Amino acid sequence: MVSDSITNAPIPSAPNSKDFSKKKRANRSAKLKQCKLDARREQWLSQVAVKSKGCKEEGNCAKKERDRSLENPRRRDEDNNDDGSIHHESDSESPSNSPTNSLLGGGGGSGGSDSGTNFIGSSSSGSSISGSSSGGCCSGSITEEEEEDDDWEAVADALAADDDNNKPEPEPENSYSQSPSESQLSMQSDSTPELTNGLGLDSANSMTETESARMVPRISGNNTQAWRPDDAYRPQSLPNLAKQRSFPATNRHFGHGGVPWSRNSVLGAPSSCPICYEDLDLTDSSFLPCSCGFHLCLFCHKRILEEDGRCPGCRKPYEHDQVESEASVQGGSLTFRLARSCSMIARS
Amino acid sequence: MATVNGYQGNTPVAAPAGTAASRQPVNAPKIVDSQSVLKRLQSELMALMMSGDCGISAFPEEDNIFFWKGTIQGIKDTVFEGTEYKLSLSFPNDYPFNPPTVKFETGCFHPNVDVCGNLCLDILKENWSSAYDVRTILLSIQSVLGEPNISSPLNSQAAQLWSNQEEYRKVVLKLYKPPSA
């Protein structure tokens, strides 16, 4: 179910739900109308450029209309995503689409989810299952973004034309996007990770929208990455996926390292090699040659391989655990090969 | 010694010096190696002095950090209670990749210590790990005093007597000569 949502959800969402939004949202302008409005906007822009005050009233009218047109493509995109995701995530509850859409108009409350939520939610759950699934998720959202690109460019042009209109826009955006998460909450049994992710992403998107309209490519980047670890708006409750992904060995170290070698804590071994007492750098501390979790620097490991060949922590031969460490710890395998090559150079 | 020979086969370049050094530490130390060994031994000395373990102590000889003198006190409620034994620790140049040579300077009536003071302890031979240090060595020896390995004794008389703890205690006290200075 989870992996399905990763691969499938973004792709069908775009064409399917375009029809959906047209049907369900008669009050909102369709794409055709939006094109007309865009055309009018350009006309207006050229008018403003050529003519002077005489056209001002007419221009203001067009401006208001354009504001509406600005909102429309964006909302429509999000409708697409929401429809697609909800439709997919709750296969058995396909009628839930209509309650979702009816909810969309409502507001109030805190938190919410928007276009990125599915992807982030699925990526987080996917990554916990297997690393490869996150790749599929990314590609999915990228194709999604590409579909959006046309609309986004239109929005971007419009936003760049008049920055004043930027500020109030996230407001309706937020209140509007809360409802999907509420519906998700009620519909999904495992909605908690989705919700927390959605919480974060909501403010992320509103931020990117207010920041600059020229950042269309960056928005797509944000959708795939969800949160940068140093992001000031990142909610505290959000699990730190980046850390888990990029430093698997470090986590393993703190998880396993302390238990069999309580002496390490006495000597402060996590910061220094227990063999040579030299400080461990980042590579060393993420280097875990043995499954017992005993840490040592690359130099000492190389030295031990040349002679004893057994882990100082558990006295098991390193050769034996080599395969396991290569399979489980990516960083470890990399540095291990390095150590091997070093030893070969030393011997020749 | 067999394992040491094994090392030699693996690393023809570095091992001969190391093999010789493991027995005679003063012999032709490599400059780079001795630097790291110095750092390790100095750190160990610091850790040992800061740890404040009761019943064990060790300190390098005056001008040779590769040669330490240590003392071990017999653990309470063992036949060695109230005794103190001097030891010598001689570190090889490839320490901690090879174990130090530990000898009893004080005569010790113990199944795993011979009359010359040589000590049979697996962690100082085939089960040596570079993660051991002076402190753990001394603590291990201290615990081995009270829990000897009877199956492979160096002092068979002591091994036979071990079952009779009262008699053993008498012999220990009779043979015990407090270390002078």
Image (cartoon, coloured by chain):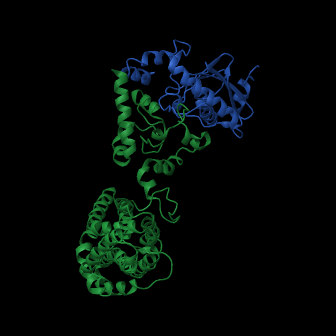
Q: Nearer the viewer, residue B84 or A204?
A: A204
Residue A291 higher or lower than A208, as above or below: above
Query: At 31% across and 66% down in the image, what residue appears?
Result: A153
Residue furthest top in the image: B28
Q: Residue at x 35, y 79 (%)?
A: A62
- Number of labelled discs? 0
Give the quadrant of the C terminus of chain B: top right
Chain A, colour shown? green
Where does residue B103 sit, x and y in percent of width and height? 61, 22
Above or below residue A220? Residue A29 is: below
Q: Nearer the viewer, residue B115 or A70?
A: A70
Residue A148's x, y, as percent? 29, 68
Residue B22: x, y in percent? 51, 19
Chain B color in figure? blue
Pick the residue in front: A242 or A11: A11
Q: Position of residue A343 (x, y in %)?
A: 37, 27
Q: Residue at x 34, y 69 (%)?
A: A155
User: Is residue B31 found left or right of B84 in the rendered image?
Assistant: left
Q: Is residue B74 visible?
A: no
Q: Is residue A97 left or right of residue A56?
A: left
In the orientation shown, which residue stands out farthest toward the right? Answer: B181
Residue A226, located in which quarter of the rendered image?
A: bottom left
The vertical placement of A173 against B34, above or below, is below
Q: Nearer the viewer, residue A324 or A36?
A: A36
Residue A347 position by quadrant: top left
